[in-house]
Amino acid sequence: MKETTIQTRTINMSIFDAGSGPLVLLCHGFPETKHAWRHQIEALAQAGYRAVAPDMRGYGKTDAPERSDQYTVLHAVGDLVALLDALGEKTAVIVGHDWGATIAWQAALTRPDRFRAIVALSVPMMGLPPVPPSKIFPQNDEALFYALYFQEPDGAEVEFNRDVRLTLHKLIFAASGEAGLRKPGGSTPNPFCMVMRSTGLLPGLPDPAALPDWLPSEDFEQLVGAFEASGFAGGLNYYRNLDRNWELQQANAGQTVNVPALFMIGERDTGLSIPGMDQIIAGMPSLIPDLRGSHTIQGAGHWLQQERPTEVLELTLGFLRQL
């Protein structure tokens, strides 16, 4: 596995690149870097694929435009199309986790000629709501939905940058399988749903004594170093474009994802306790005619490819071999 920087026509992207064969493009989410795919890259290469994992726009060693409006899903999809061109690749199977999954769904929806299949982790395909997300997310005088808090200039960005190590430790643990079972339908309290305006997010999260066993200290230190260098602005800018994404995606309203698709989520993913999420997952076949599997991985939380690397790899390889 080599690390290199690729100059594309949109931005310079830092990537891990391994193997030869059909391209599998691995897109991370928040707060992660390309290192989140460390367990899958070499394994995919050994299985006969070219595995490429970029630091996404605003993360790690990839360029981070200063303007927050440069972080829409269309910018991100454009980066990936430009990356394929720079790599000399016509098509790829796109694999995404968290925000990487959101971007992967849009890539498969809008450019099926370039992204011939999709594997999505943790975030299902969702249809466009009738109004912008900011009109749906709950808020009151005392608290607001985490995705709104993440958008505020004096909110999460200031809080998270204050102590990067503490921030990452708390975020990772609270969304992991170690934090406990998440039941569908909102019956389990979700620390990521509502954020108190007076205190911010982190005080309401558990204070773990140690890192989870699946995250060795050297991997955690790599993540800390990356965010100490970049800060959290790039990752939070994706949230700042939720309403703008809704506007830009109107051209694709009602369109289905027409490439082969695979979905997986952890049994203890915090997203499962967001009201309505179980219905969204159950309704995916209407949006994805060629959905070839929807899997819940027992005991796993949100960081699926790190918490359960073997299961994720086996499901992904099984899907790839059917294409």
Image (cartoon, rainbow, N blue to C red):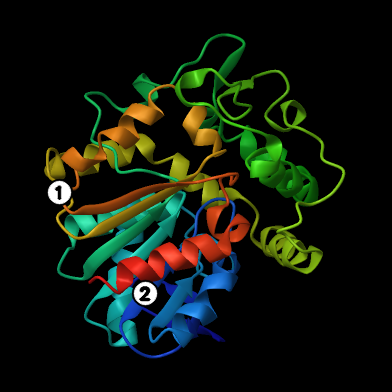
277 left or right, relative to 31: left
Residue drawn at (48%, 67%) of the image: 313
**Residue 71 visible in the displayed image:** no
Residue type at mark 1?
Answer: Pro
Residue drawn at (69%, 62%) of the image: 223
Q: Residue furthest top?
A: 141
On screen, residue 237 above or below 273: below
The kind of secondary structure element at disc 1 is loop
27 left or right, relative to 215: left
Across and down, in percent, residue 18 comes to 48, 86
Specify the quadrant of the image occupied by residue 218: bottom right
**Residue 319 visible in the displayed image:** yes
Specify the quadrant of the image occupied by residue 305: bottom right
Residue drawn at (52%, 72%) of the image: 40
Residue drawn at (12%, 38%) of the image: 254
Q: Quadrant of the C terminus?
A: bottom left
Residue type at mark 2?
Answer: Val
Disc ID at residue 289: 1
Disc ID at residue 24: 2
Q: How many marks?
A: 2
Q: How far apart are labels 1 and 2 at the CA level?
A: 22 Å
Q: Quadrant of the N terminus?
A: bottom right
Q: Residues within 10 Å of mark 1 (few under 14, many from 20)?
A: some
Q: Earlier in the sequence, mark 1 or mark 2?
A: 2
Q: Residues within 10 Å of mark 2 (few under 14, many from 20)?
A: many
